Structure formats: structure tokens, C-alpha cells
Image: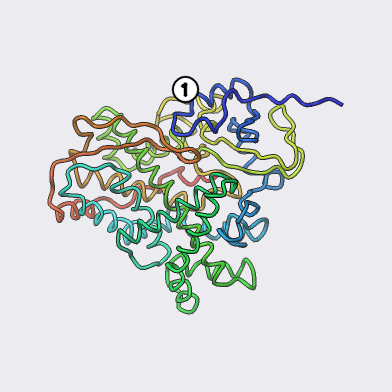
Amino acid sequence: MTVQTRPAAPVSLRDLRDVDPYPAYERMRAVGPVVWDAGMIAWLILSHDGCTFVERREDLFAEPTGSLPSAGEIVGRRDIRSLVDGQHEVLHRSLSHLWRPDPIAPLAIAAVLPLVAERLAGLADRTAIELFADLARLLPIAVIARVLGVPDADAETLDRAKGWMEAVLAWRHSYGEDPDARAAAVEATRQLEPALLDTVRDRRDRPRDDAISFLWAAGREVAPDWNEQDVLDNAKFLFEAGSETTGFLICTAVHRLLELPETIRRATLADPATFARFLEEVLRHSTVVHLRARTATKDVELGGVTIRAGERVIAVNAAANRDPARWEHPDALDPERPRLWGHLAFNVGPRHCAGAHLARMEATETILGLWRAFPDLGRPPGARAQVPIGFVSRTWRPVDLAWTAVAADTVRKQVLDGPDWAGSVPGSAAVSG
């Protein structure tokens, strides 16, 4: 019998936490488009075509969340990631339709922009902040609370909720294999549910124009016995999905903006379409969510290797987004490049991120709001160097910012008097693929 030789990754993903992984991705790509990572006990898919194939073909590569240890206690039986086939398609299609660019534009004006204005007004007399700790960490979770229809919470409550979500993410990112992360995620889930339960029960009988009401209506199309636990489980997932990654995107985009010459930065911030292209290129070039795990459902030939049924497969979307077979000079940040909209930052296929346009909108309003509020914003003298952090999701920190003191009322006015949300530009819808 012939034993397959597995092309070995020269470095394991396990060794790339809190470092710049892109040089290692290129070393892997030199071995082949599909390599075996012994440390992760997984196949790594590095090419754009390969990642697209894995993510589109759910019949061959299953989303593993529902099979992770303690999944039933943490995410429930019918959260959107655990649903498969027609049930998943119904809920995912409905959410994706709800959060298309044009339908969420009024949300930007009615909910997100005022929230950004208040958060920035609260920082006006600080004159110096670290972007993630002082703004981007809690802002997205406050936004998603408004989207869900949950009453606004104070900073202490949001901080607790964020901590719960970080515990669940740690469980996901360890694939449920770390017993401490698993126990923390179970406890975090128990703590979060009471914060949502009153709203879930109220919207069952008195629906409003919010996402929890939507989950009740859409869920009844998923299953006739759809109940409050199903709505709770999906509301918890939306909280989780709307927290870390959007905060990381805000930090990454500001970091890249501050690397630009001042004249180019000002021009980028001054024109909505130019900023939209810049943000899209940041999503490709400096991808936030690097890894998407799947499990092979049967033997598959891909990239010159045989992936066996039951083996873990990780689509390294960040490597795919710098695939030289698709983009010229992929390591360069170039918002004018052709094929700008074809990246995989939000996944692709049946599991593409339903909240992709919501994340773009939050990042757009926050970043443009920052510079409207504080026109002389920049790095302070002696600012600390930014270093890469993260593993599955990544950004650069610390992002130290400083400005000349401005009155809080002036900040509110300057932010609220800005132009309407610019995220819906020609071509943007193609990103979801």
C-alpha cells in the first residue's frame, strides 16, 4: 500500500500568535497551495481558489461549530452556525437580506452615528487615547445591542458583556479542546442569557423594528417549534459576531490610515467613495479574520493532496487575500487596484458573513467620525510602536491617538453634521460573493 506524503508546513499556525504571520504564509505557499500543519493537526488551504472552493462546498467541508465539545451548552442546537442545509439557508438568507447596504443606511443615521457621536464627545477632553481600549472595544457591542433592540447599557454592563463574548470566542478559537476555555464559555453563556431574555420575551408578543423581532419571524420559517431559546442562542451569536472583529477592523484601518502621507490621508477621508475603496483594500491586505475551520465530510482531492474524511481543514483567508495568482503585488496596499472587491475577508459561499455591510458601516462611521470630531488627530509624540496581536482574528496595537482639546458639544455637532453613510458604493455588494 502506498502511503501519501503530506507536504509539511514549514511552521505551524500555533507558533504565529501575536506575530506578523504573512512571511510565514508565503513560506507555506512555497511548499504548495495545500499543506499539512502537524501542530494544528489540520490541512491549511492557502490559495484564493482553494479557500473559495472549501467555503462554497459545504457538502464536502462542514462547518464544525455544532460538533465542538460543549456546543449544546454554549451555542445551542439551532444557532445559525450550528444549522445546516435548508434550515441554515433560510436564516442566513434572511439576515443577509436584512443587512444589505441600502436597508442598513437608515440605521447608520438613526442609531450608529448618534452612538459614535456620544462616545467621541465623552472622549473630547481626554486629548489622548488608545483606540481599542478607549473606543473600539466596546463601541461595536453597543451598536449590536441597538441593532438587536436591547436597551442601551452603561459602560460597566457593556464591559461585562464583552468579557462574556471573549470567553465564547476563546472556546471557538481553541476548537473546544481547551477544558478551561470550555468551562469559561459555558459560564459566560449562562451570564449573558439573562441580559437578553426580557427583550426576547417582549418581542415574541410585541415585535418592533429590531433584530430580535426579526429572529422570531425568520425563525418560524426555519422550524415550526422555534422557541425563545432559539432566539436567545442566535441573539448571543450576533453579539459575539459583532464585537471583536469590528473593533479590530477599526483599529487596523486607522493604523493603515496613519501610515499614509498626510495629503493622501486627507483625500481618503474627504471623499466617501475613496474611503470605501480604501476600507475594502484594508480588508483584503490586512484581513481581520485569518482562519476559517471546516471538517472534511468525505475524501477530497485538492491542491495535489488527498484530504481524508474527518480531517480538519483550515481556509487561511488572509493568505488567500494575498495570493499572487489573483492579485499583482499583493503585499502592497493599493485601493486603486483592479478586482478590489474579490477578497475573502468576510468568507464566501453559504457561510459568508451576513453582517459584512453592518461591519463596514460601523467602521466607516467610527473612523470618519473620529477625524470630523478631531481634525488634527494623529499619533502623539513618543507613541508606542504598533505590534500585531491575535491568532484567528488579528489587528495592530496599541494605536495611540492624540488631538487638541475640543468641547463635547462641538464634537457632537461635527460628527452628526457629517455626510450620510458612504458604504453603499458601486461594487461593494460583490464582496459577499
Nearest to the observer: residue 245 or residue 195 = 195
Which residue is painted at 19% across and 41% down in the image?
Answer: 375
SS for callout 1: loop
Residue 22: give x, y in percent of width and height.
Answer: 48, 27
Judge whether 290 appears above or below 331 on screen.
Answer: below
Q: Is residue 30 left or right of residue 16?
A: right
Residue 111: give x, y in percent of width and height.
Answer: 33, 60
How many neighbours does mark 1 have within 10 angstroms: few (below 14), some (14-19), or many (20 or more)?
A: few
Pick the quarter of the image with the C terminus. top right
Q: Quadrant of residue 229?
A: bottom right
Figure label count: 1
Q: Quadrant of residue 159?
A: bottom left
Which residue is painted at 23% across and 55% down in the image?
Answer: 416
Q: Is residue 32 left or right of residue 298?
A: left
Q: Is residue 118 left or right of residue 60?
A: left
Residue 158: give x, y in percent of width and height.
Answer: 35, 58
Name of the residue lying farthest toward the right:
1
Pick the quarter of the image with the N terminus. top right
Judge whether 358 appears above or below 251 on screen.
Answer: below
Nearest to the observer: residue 140 or residue 9 = 9
Colour style of the rendered protein structure: rainbow
Residue 361: give x, y in percent of width and height.
Answer: 38, 50
Which residue is painted at 72% across and 35% down in the image?
Answer: 307
Name of the residue lying farthest toward the front:
180
Q: Is residue 126 left or right of residue 303?
A: left
User: What residue sits right under mark 1 in the picture?
Assistant: 329
Given the image, on which type of amino acid does mark 1 rest?
His
